[in-house]
Amino acid sequence: METKYFTLITGASQGFGKAMAIECSKRHMNLVLVSLPNTGLNELSDFLKKIYDVSVLSIEMDLCTSENCHLLFEKVKKEQISIRYFINNAGVLSKGLFKDLDINYILCQISLNICTPTLLIKLFLNDLKQNAPSGILNVGSMASFFYLPKKQVYGGTKAYLLTFSRSLRRELRPENISVSIVCPGGMNTTAALTYQNRTGSWGSRMSIMNPEDAAKFAIDGMLKGKEIIVPGLLNRFFMFLNGILPKPVKDKITAIEMNKFKTEMLCS
Amino acid sequence: MKVFLTGATGYIGNRLAMKLAENNYKVHALVRNLKSDNIPVHPNIQLFEGNLNDTNSIEKAISNCDYVFHTAAFTKLTCNDVKEFYNVNVKGTANVLNAAKSNGVKKIIFTSSVSVFGPSQPNSSIIENQPRMSSYANDYELTKTMAENLVLEYNRKGLPGIILNVSRVYGPGINGFSNGVNRFISMLLKNKVVFVPSRLNIETNYVYIDDVTKAHLLALTNGNGGEKYIIGGENASYEKLFTTISECNQTKIPVVKINYIVLKTGLFLKSLFDKLLLNEPSLTPKLLDYIFTNRNVSSQKAVTQLGYEITTLKNGMEQTLRFLKN
């Protein structure tokens, strides 16, 4: 009997995670989808099964705690499911100025954006080894590269993921496990956010992507084993500028870029 | 029984106002212009001048009403300004919901569209609880979704709200932007030759106007707060639509197909030209794609839970042709 491989996606019920779940289904990849309870995950899973004829296991849980991460691992193992691709997408977005942020919000953000992906990779590493060639895709952000006000902790957690991914990639190369990180810019994820994106300046509207387009690019990159995946021509241009411009100029650009990121902040 | 109604000068709202009035409901209709040609006239209909962004006018019209029908919307898909959509469809809805809640309204029926679900997937009809699979195709879809979210939010706060997701409506009624099918049929009847894009296999759903107004009344009596109901008719391809119209009219419609890509390129150039000359935008490539999108729906939930009944495309078309020829 042919072994059934699965791709696990966290934060899969909405936005970019949902778009990646749909994209993987289109490529006939079987899925384990995880997200918070009552966010429409079961409806999405049922629909993907029906339309794309893939196997989908949906698990509703809050991944903020390490207990739940262990519980997730046990649940997947109980179903005798073997993971080949692991997509760490669940995360908490930024909200505002550091002085205004609730400390519990920040701690939860650090926990979900840093501890959860680290722990989950540790737990599922054996699966990935057994199913090699296999892959890990961490979801970073353009904020992994840029230093932005109101994105202090968020940017910090995404910078951690960038460093973590790039180092781990070198460690796991001999095992034939590819580690990638996707760093998207602003996206039309929820209706409220889409509206804000559409009312932004011309420049920022040009760089906003639809999650389905970014997801296609991200999954392509993951399957090809790319190290850093930046969806969107304009975003790649920002990255290029970041590499060549002197620091004072970059600070000016960052200030302009803030307008773009402003939109992302209001959603969490 | 008193009901508050918005959109009385629109295609659905106008027909609904008359239907309610004929069924002995006292209708408080909010209208922007008392002199509009599309005002429904009936002794049971009382007009209130105002608009959705004038909360005082809403307060005046809604007071002492038991139920609300919110059919008004900004539907002009050629409009490029998202704020125009937002002000009417989102802010306006928020104002209606707010007034309804504070005036102790028992139930609100919100008229929405099946386009909030996005395109239908191959071999699958859209149902109420399916997830949206792609981003919003235009500002209308986006703002109607935001409005639906508001209705559901108020439902959780204790104002029972029912959402009716209506498919493409046709049948007797006033002319307007929401009445594209009628305009198209008139064109078919008038012209000797009709040019159409080559994608005639695209399937969408056509609902007869009187089914839509009946569904609103059924939702009032049988609908549950917080529920969405798809109000559709028959799924049909453009090919089938043409055949049905031909059959009902007992003439053959000479249809000439234009290659879709060629047409789209032409429209792209035309819209560039319109932009340069600051002309009012007409049919854009984006709008063409929107019209030529598969939208098969299933109204099964409305049939079983509301007692909704569907008029066949043939029956509905016969009545529509009779209306348009007079």
Image (cartoon, rainbow, N blue to C red):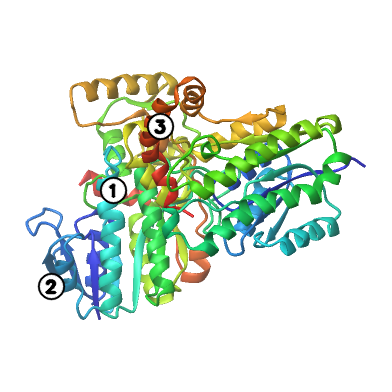
Residue under mark 2: which chain is it in?
B
Residue under mark 3: which chain is it in?
A
Residue on which the image places disc 3? A251
Q: Position of residue B293 (x, y in %)?
A: 46, 38
Q: How many neighbours does mark 1 have within 10 angstroms: few (below 14), some (14-19), or many (20 or more)?
A: many
Observer-nearest of A209 and B259: A209
Residue under mark 1: which chain is it in?
B
Element carrying mark 2: loop
The amino acid on which the numbered mark 3 sits, given as a three-letter code, is Asp
Q: Position of residue A154 (x, y in %)?
A: 53, 48
The residue drawn where x is 65% and y is 50% is A114
The amino acid on which the numbered mark 2 sits, given as a three-letter code, is Pro
Q: CA distance from mark 3 to mark 2?
A: 68 Å
Q: Is residue A245 left or right of residue B40?
A: right
Residue B149 in the image: above or below residue A188: below
Observer-nearest of A157 and A55: A157
Residue on which the image places disc 1? B85
